[in-house]
Image (cartoon, grey):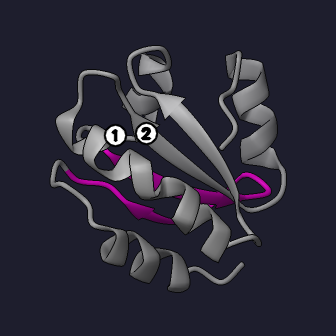
């Protein structure tokens, strides 16, 4: 999981290869619930680059992308959004896996 250091770095990931942006925050209980299985999910989908986005640190981006609930996932490639799993509900490994399988990498 890549943790970007700046908005500029995030922009590079949006414009590049297929990336999964995982919006999270330290205080988010549902985020802490799913975070331990994220390495397993990453291993299942080597065709994706996973980017962890701290919603509080990158509030402007979260607002621009309409991320009003976390944990949330947005997949992009070459500047285009391919899909999103965005809501305020707790996510399971199965839900995330099914979502990622629906995206053609």
Compared to 66, does 58 lie above or below?
A: above
The tag on residue 4 is: none
In this rendering, would 99 be left or right of 103? left
Q: Secondary structure at mark 1?
A: loop
Q: Which quadrant holds residue 39? A: bottom right
Q: Position of residue 74 (x, y in %)?
A: 50, 55
- Vertical order, 33 against 75 (above or below): above
Helix, strand or loop for the magenta stretch, by majority: strand
Nearer mark to the viewer, of 2 and 1: 2
Q: Which residue is mark 1?
A: 67
Residue 104 occupies quadrant:
bottom right
Q: Residue at x 26, y 47 (%)?
A: 33
Q: Which residue is mark 2?
A: 23
79 in the magenta segment: yes
**From the image, which quarter does the N terminus lie in?**
top right
> From mark 2 to mark 1, how far is it between C-alphas?
8 Å
Density class for disc 1 (Cα within 10 Å; few <14, some 14-19, many ≥20) is many
Which numbered disc, 2 or 1, marks the residue that appears first in the sequence? 2
Question: In the figure, 14 relative to 76: above or below?
Answer: above
Q: Which span of residues is magenta-colored?
A: 71-87
Residue under the point 38% across and 35% down: 24
Q: Are marks 2 and 1 in contact (CB under 8 Å)?
A: yes
Q: Is residue 94 above or below residue 70?
A: below
Q: What is the x, y in percent for residue 76? A: 65, 58
């Amino acid at each position: 999981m890549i943790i970007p250091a700046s908005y500029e770095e995030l922009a590079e990931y949006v414009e590049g290869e297929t990336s999964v942006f995982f919006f999270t925050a330290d205080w988010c209980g549902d985020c802490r619930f799913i975070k331990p299985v994220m390495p397993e999910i990453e291993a299942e989908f080597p065709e994706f680059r996973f980017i962890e986005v701290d919603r509080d640190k990158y509030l402007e981006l979260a607002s621009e992308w309409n991320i009003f609930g976390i944990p949330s996932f947005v997949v992009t490639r070459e500047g285009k959004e391919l899909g999103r799993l965005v809501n305020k509900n707790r996510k399971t490994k199965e839900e995330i896996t099914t979502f990622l399988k629906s995206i053609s990498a």
